[in-house]
Amino acid sequence: MKITPLILALTLVFLATAHAEQGSQSHESIAEAVKAYIAQNINLQGEYEASLVPLDSRLNLPQCAEPLDVFTTTGLIKAGRTTIGVRCNVQKKWSIFTSAIIKTYQMVVVLSQPIQRGEIITRQHLAIEKRDSSNLREDFVTQIEQVEHKQVTRQLNTGTILSLSHLVEPKLIKRGDKVVISTTKSDFSIRMSGVAMMDGTKGQLITVKNQNSGRIINATVVEPGLVSVNY
């Protein structure tokens, strides 16, 4: 059968009209649905920023007649790169996966000046700043009180975000140090001279030699030069 130009033109118009009525799901609507899902399901401390990896411009999906269904395979929204699914459950069903990069921001403790290995941290070393915490170790520090008077285990530069792994309790007493042994009861207290037989940090139980009796006893480190014994 010979197709006339008029029939061909009417056919093209019909197909174009049908495609326009069906429509395509805009990438913008998919992005908005994903952002709304993140806002409703995110459970992270501090502020966050979510950016979506753009969909392939060649992706053409039928317009969904119902609100899009957004989901994750794990049910969790984590900091970092997260995979989030989007699907249409009616008529011409379809399903795709998108990627979101989520950054979280928290107030953290940083060094305002460099510090050498073995130094004791003071308040003058510290500042609090808002930083991207998405990829930080879980033991990063948010309160100055957590690190003040602690000893650093290695050299750290200005701007370093402090974590507990950078720190140890300083040795208040070293082996061979002369110490005061304090014993306190409800009605009296005794103070004796002693010598530390081992290093000790605050609250640590160490062995001490009583210089008067020569006995070796266990005592708790209180501060430099002072240990206590409970009987």
Image (spheres, rainbow, N blue to C red):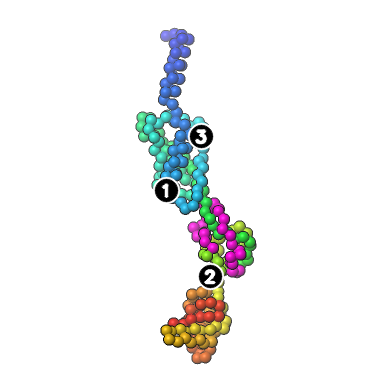
Image quarter in which the N terminus is found:
top left
Query: Residue 108, percent across and down?
Result: 54, 57
Asked where in the image residue 88 lies, by quadrant, the reply is: top left
Mark 3 Cα-neighbour bin, 10 Å: few <14, some 14–19, many ≥20: few
Name the element at disc 2.
Answer: loop
Can you identify the residue that label 1 sits on?
Answer: 76
Answer with mark 2 or mark 3, whichever residue precedes in sequence: 3
Q: Residue at x 45, y 36 (%)?
A: 30
Answer with mark 2 or mark 1, whichever residue precedes in sequence: 1
Please report the bounds of the magenta region as a residue range: 118-144
- The residue lying furthest to the bottom in this view is 213
Kindly identify the amino acid type of the residue bearing the numbered disc 2: Glu
Query: Residue 44, percent across and down?
Result: 46, 51
Can you identify the residue that label 2 sits on?
Answer: 169
Kindly identify the amino acid type of the residue bearing the numbered disc 1: Leu
Query: Residue 73, percent across and down?
Result: 40, 45
Q: Is residue 12 left or right of residue 110?
A: left
Res 56 label: 3
Q: Residue at x 51, y 84 (%)?
A: 181
Asked where in the image residue 36 lies, by quadrant, the reply is: top left
> Is residue 187 among what the camera can see?
yes
